[in-house]
Amino acid sequence: MPITSIVIFLPLLGALALLLVRGVSAIRWTALVTTTVTFLVSLLLWTGFDPAADPAVPQMVDVLSGWFPEWLDVKYVVGIDGLNLLLVLLTTLLGPIVVLGSWTYIGKQHRGYYALVLLLQTGVTGVFTSYDLFLFYIFFELTLIPMYFIIGIWGSENRIYAAVKFVIYTLVGSLLMLVAIIYLGYAAGNAVNGGVFTTDYFKLLAYDVPLGMQTWLFFLFALSFAIKVPLFPLHTWLPDAHVQAPTGGSVILAGVLLKMGTYGLVRFCLPFFPNAAQEYSVLFAVLAVIGIIYGALVARVQPDAKKLVAYSSVSHLGFVVLGLFAFNLEALQGALIQMINHGLSTGALFLIVGMLYERRHSRLMADFGGIARVAPVLSFFMVFSALASAGLPGLNGFVGEFLILIGSFQSSYTGGPVLVALATTGVILAAVYLLWMIYRTFFGEITHEANRTLPDLNPREVLVLAPLAVLMFVLGFFPHSFLKVSEPAAASLLDRIEEKRAAVLEAAEAAEAMAATFDGTQFEVAAPSTPAP
Amino acid sequence: MDAALLVQLILLLPLAGAVFNGILPLFLPALRTREPLIGAVATAVVAIPFVLVLILFLGYEPGQPVIVDFFPWIVAGDLEVHFAYRIDELSLVMGLIVTGVGALIHLYAVGYMHGDSGFWRFFAYLNLFIFAMLNLVLGDNMVVLFLGWEGVGVCSYLLIGFWYTNLKNSAAANKAFIVNRIGDFAFLVAMFLLFRELGGLDFTTITEGGGAIPEATLNWIVLLLFIGATGKSAQIPLFVWLPDAMAGPTPVSALIHAATMVTSGLYLLARLSPVVLAAPDIMVVIAVVAALTAIMAASIAIAQNDIKKVLAYSTVSQLGYMFMAAGVGAFFVAIFHVMTHAFFKACLFLGSGSVIHAMHHVEHEVEHKTGKHIDPQDMRTMGGLKKYMPATSRTYFIAMLAIAGIPPLAGFFSKDEILFKAFEYGYDGHAYAWFVWIVGLLTAVLTAFYMARSYYLTFEGEERWPLADQVHPHESPWTMTVPLWVLAGLSVVGGFLGLPGVIAHGEWNLIHHWLGEPYGGPVAEPVLAPHGEGFLAIEWGLILLGAGIAFAGWLFARAKYRTDGLAYDAHLRAKLGGLYRAWEGKYYWDELYDRLVVRPLMRFSERGLAAFDRYVVDGAVNGVAALTAGISRGLRYMQTGIVQNYALAIVFGALLVISLILFA
């Protein structure tokens, strides 16, 4: 059974089914059932995944070729490996949570909203599971359109500006990446695929991109992904998009859409262009650390709770990028688990801010205050998620941050211990802005009459938040069950990077040596492209 | 029962209690008011672990640490962190203190918190605290210790801000957590360094391999760990959160902010004592900072009128004593003082809680009758409480004598041992230890003085609250007085565990024999040159000096404060002038931090970064968009739609091409 493809396309099927059903309730239930079933099916990926198998080979692969002419080696190929399994599960888990979280938030055009949410899920799942760069690109762009409409139609007062900014910003990056993909496809085709243009992940991986070319291609790819992450200073679309998007949109955006950027870095950028990635790793580490501190400080002075959480994402994703560019197993594993953790805790924070918005139609912290008294359950989930987000040991956030920092600290690629120590101040600053939000919103006397009758969470809302809270706890105390899923893949990725880096370097040196030996003899230097074993 | 099962129960019972008292009532509001059930469960899940630790303690074979490894926690690459726990001399002592004193305070809190609408929540936090604290003292590696370290910090945050409707309490909670996080930051970096140097974070690796780390790196590690400790254990420069932490309910102040959590910095240094000893330069820093903290806090305590503030600064000062011991290499003495301090300071705090409990009643009555408001924690409106609260006043008196260092109570032995160790280390040739010793002596006088002051202002002399002839406070219920008596009893006998070297050549110093490395324990100590013949006389002299100082401080305060204390305070204020005002103003640390750190950082974030983000980073993005739009707008004029214009353009274009072909 092509489980991977089912997980990808079931939501799309559900979106089509939505066109047939009538009535708001039926629409919601269809969406809920679709996403829930998708999540249950995706659990088969978890149970069927064999962590002991060769980590370089994806499992549960579905291939569909022949939809392109022979001179284009472009295929539909999807599968699961240690790098994407948890991200896929996060995506499918957030599906029903987003639908349930939007249940009453969305007040108009239900059919369109839920159809777009489902379509978006197909796009994101596709991004994470593609083993063909072209396919990846299609899914990557596919996520753009639903998100554009979700922000633009169901967003708040400034939604059009935010939606347009989101699309254009991302598009600029991805079009540059497209140029790089086409170039890479031809170059790799010539080198390792008998002259046939290829976007097959493994063939691209086998192709040692020459030193000079790596830098260009690396930056074209990295720019696109850095915008998506977003890495400082490319982050300003994010607060706008988050603040304007409806809750469900924000949850998807923070939970999985940003991870497409970091995933792209780890899946493509680093292994395709290891020499360039390592040469410029300090640049990325510095930007990541600036993002950590800058995002946190700017978060602290936001009057708008949602904007605060949005800037906290800039800070948290900085940790992930730092971990990716450390090139050691501790930090890489930390970055991988941190992607999941950020999805859970920030997703929960957005949901809670959204629940407050539904009650009072305000995101301004000044409009709340003292509501712990009237809404203890809501406050519990808020404090819990905030502590997880602040990296409290025993909850999920700590595991990733700790691994990233301890790994980066040992790494020779991340600009030295002092820079990593600076990044570590993020743990202080996270407490500063998150506790401030809780202080301002939940504690003190109730100052606004309207808050006196603020209802606490209803069972549906508890059902939305409880799974996230449980997972924050599980990932905090038992991260090993998850870390060991990605460890072989992460280790093999690092080996591959090291091998390839050495091979490219050797080829470049050999070429140089030959050029020196036969200086003046017009010796044609062969393209330094040795197919990898 | 085997050790693994015991450890499991010891750790999980308090956690289960936290879930039972916290999560269940959260979703089942009917449970929230079941005080007897909640109180009984909360106390039992701490009392039972106490018995279990006792079983482990009695069955322990000295020198044979038991390590219980449950399951891997964070494993990646070379890093291998397990949920592993270590049962040895040190962790057993700490475990006994935490669960024993903890159980007493839980029992006390059942009475103290009676009728509070957050009763369930309170005990959930308190149980969770015990769970975290047990992780801290039982963990076998730095990361599990850190789990406890941060966990107790969160519980402290939740409990300081327990009465959250008053924003002042929540602000104090935030301050405590953030200041602690600054220390935790240093702790984290120390762990990174340790892992880089040793490739592992379990205590065996660290204590055995620590000495081989290059000196500069080792100094950094120990310094960073000490900075971490200054956060949790309230030393200069990070002590500022502890006085504010008194905003929490008094049992919390007793348990967390006196007896257990604040001593975890000492536990950390004792646990890593072989590493600390290898960094003598940093030991100087530790000792000097500790001495300055001790005398600074003691002097502030003299000028405080809030009974809990006096005790808070006293705690800071006593923690200073413990760090002095650590700074001269006497880690086991630091732990000895941790223990005796847990007894008498918990007793004092619970006594103050009993007083506040009673004064609350007075406050209500007075407010009801006159509309006037009094502060139930202000000693200036107390006085004469001895008559109404015999159990509280007697236990407070005993504990006061203990902390003042009156022989043969607990504080006398432990404090005297610290001063002796400082003296001995100076005698051994470490000049800085003399400084520590002298400051320690001065602090001892001040301690006896301000503690006696607090006793006499509260319990003796005139009854100073309004309508004192009509409104009378009452003694607290048995759930509160029983813990007081138990702790007072321990404050009397606790010192005999560490009899000084003059008695039987130190053979009866049980705590030294239990913890000390020379006897197979885990706590290292420096090797000193043998003393000369006459040293015994010096030792006796020092003991007499210590006792004399304590008596002097106590009796002086007794003379001045017993009948009319307020007059003597006024006299002091007039006489000392600026110095007294500095004490009242707590040396203006808060103001200093506010001006130097908090406000500049906020200004920088708000007017610097946020503005930069908006106008520069985002401005550039919008600028590019505007530029594109502007160019397009300009280009739009070319698309006029008038065919003649296009034709003209084609002609010019053709001419241009032709001329290029012809002339180029």
Image (cartoon, rainbow, N blue to C red):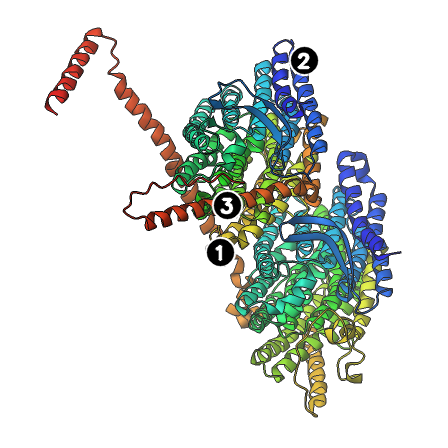
Residue at mark 2: chain? A
| C-beta proximity under 8 Å, tags 3 and 1 | no
Earlier sequence position, callout 2 versus callout 1: 2
Residue B380, image x and y in percent?
66, 61
Q: Earlier in the sequence, mark 3 or mark 1?
A: 3
Kind of residue sitting beneath label 1:
Val
In the picture provided, is B116 more to the left or to the right than A336? right
| Disc 3 element | loop
Nearest the eye: B297 or B126? B126
Pointers 2 and 1 in contact (C-beta within 8 Å): no
Q: Is residue B201 visible?
A: yes
Q: Residue at x 63, y 40 (%)?
A: A486
Residue identifier under label 2? A26
Measure the alpha-carbon separation of dots 2 and 1.
Answer: 57 Å
Badge 1 element: helix
Q: CA distance from mark 2 to mark 3?
A: 47 Å
3 and 1 marks on the same chain: yes
**Frontmost residue, A156 versus B141:** B141
Residue indicated by mark 3: A325
Q: How many marks?
A: 3
Name the residue located 76 percent from the left edge and 62 percent from the top edge: B91
Quickly name the residue at label 1: A418
Q: Chain of mark 3?
A: A
The furthest residue to the bottom: B533
**Same chain letter for marks 2 and 1:** yes
Q: Nearer the viewer, mark 2 or mark 3?
A: 3
Name the amino acid, label 2: Ala
> Which image quarter is the N terminus of chain B in?
bottom right
Circle 2 or circle 1, nearest the eye: 1
Q: Are marks 2 and 3 on the same chain?
A: yes
**How far, Cα to Cα, is label 3 from label 1?**
16 Å
